[in-house]
Image (cartoon, rainbow, N blue to C red):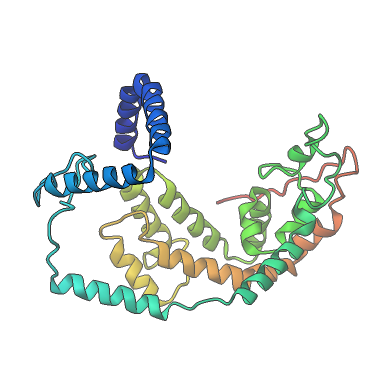
Amino acid sequence: MLEPYEQQHYDNLHKWMNPKWDFIVMQATEQYKASKERKKPDRVVLDCQERAYWIVHRPPRRTHSAMDYGLDRLIDPNAEEVLTFDMVRRTNIFLTQALMRSAVKSSVSLTAFVKYVTTHHNHDPFLTTPVPSNPWITDSDEFWQLNSRSVDIPTKLSVERWVLSFWELISDPRGRVDFKLFLKKEHSAENMAFYEAAEEMRWGAASAIPEKSQFIFNTFLKPGAPRWINIDGRTMGLTVKGLVVPHRYVLDAAQTHIFLLMKKDTFYRYLKSPVHKDIFYNVPPVSVPGYLLPLPQVSGP
């Protein structure tokens, strides 16, 4: 994906070269054939002549060459880099972190990959036979409609996928609705509300960031807030301090803390709760026609 200015320069270059491209290809083909027909001593002489020419006509230092000059650059590629203390310090920190980064053995990676494939085998339509029909070899798209992310009526396959991981659960809009219902009964619905507000601020419009950050602070982070979230003091302090000059990623630490809290604690209690068991054991397979599972109603935010 090119930046807008890169796409503009690329389009101009393409427009400039388009009527000449056939001629360039033809000329290159003829030169290639001529070079093949030359004898080896002639090729050596021509190569030496070309090398000598570029040694004599090499552009002076600190000047742009027509061979390498393209878009306007923020730095001069021919300028000598002056090392400063700050540059050396940052390079040292980067190399130290690179050495401390843990390396995963190939056997461990392959084991994890095999485990993932085994776990998701039944949920891959290319490894198992899709039901009620295969949309790739038939004209029926019922499989895609029933297993859509935004469907109101989950299938047995969708409900089983929620058990695989917490991310699978909240990635499915239908599963997120069911999880919110459980959180409301647990009196901890503010965790998911804060997570969604942080996601909206991260991916929303830049012009709305100040307004959203103020809303999040007054609703979730301010002492005595109506939906105050329970996070550790250090994370709370860093988040509140960062909201003075808000940006897209100012809530990352608090959002990660809430996500891990729901993943390690709330998610497993949800799997054992009657809310999940009712839908898990009562939802029929997709082969049962005409069965509609009602969507639970979550009142309030």
Q: Where is residue 178 in the image (x, y as percent from the top left)?
A: 68, 55
Q: In which quarter of the image is residue 254?
A: bottom left
Q: Is residue 115 above or below residue 22?
A: below
Q: Can residue 6 be seen in this view?
A: yes
The outermost residue toward the top is 19
Looking at the image, which residue is at 45% across and 49% down?
200
Residue 233 appearing in the image? no
Question: Which image quarter is the N terminus in?
Answer: top left
Residue 21: x and y, percent?
38, 24
Residue 142 horizontal/vertical position (percent): 80, 36
- What residue is drawn where x is 39% and y is 32%? 34
Seen at 51% across and 67% down, the residue is 258
Residue name at image x 41 percent, y 51 percent: 201
- Left or right for 245, reference 157: left
Report the number of discs. Answer: 0
Q: In this view, does 68 lie above or below 222?
A: above
Query: Closer to the camera, 35 or 4?
Result: 35
Residue 110 x, y percent position in the rendering: 66, 70
Outermost residue, right side? 288
| Residue 198 found in image quarter | bottom left
